[in-house]
Amino acid sequence: MNRVHPVLLCACIAMLAKVAAQPASAPSDADMPMADYLGLLKQIAPAARDGAQAYAQAFQQRCGRALTTAELRRATSAGSGDPVLMGMIRASQVRDAKAITELGQRVACGDRR
């Protein structure tokens, strides 16, 4: 089974987030639906999509609303990425369901920008 090195995986995700955040016009959630963004992540690495999907589901459960694509893009690209999201991606890579569940309890609702 081919495995993607976690550092390379995170770098690819950050690169995708930066590219997706730079459309020709002002960005909005309508520019890229969540399903399309997750589909792009899947093309980079299935673990990236799985981790992001788990993060979005945990956000929905904890915060009572859906995570927007813009919020997910910020979580992947801000600094070295949201530590909880990056942890969920790593846990998805090694198929650690327990870690995904534990990390899901640490997802922050934060404020919408």
Image (cartoon, rainbow, N blue to C red):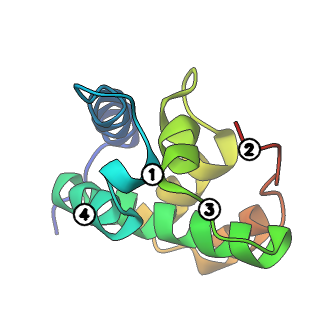
> Looking at the image, is 79 positioned above or below residue 11?
above
Secondary structure found at label 1: helix
Amino acid type at image mark 4:
Lys
Earlier along the polypeptide chain: callout 1 or callout 3? 1
Residue 50 or residue 108, whichever sits in front: 108
Report if the CB atoms under discs 3 and 4 are less than 8 Å apart: no
**Mark on residue 112?**
2
Residue placed under numbered mark 4 in the picture: 42
Residue 63 seen in render? yes
Residue 94 seen in render? no
Q: Is residue 61 left or right of residue 67?
A: right
Amino acid type at image mark 3:
Leu
Q: Single out the mark in the foreground, 3 or 2.
A: 2
Q: Is residue 66 left or right of residue 24?
A: right
Amino acid type at image mark 2:
Arg
Q: Single out the mark in the foreground, 1 or 3.
A: 1
Q: Quadrant of the C terminus?
A: top right
Residue placed under numbered mark 3 in the picture: 67
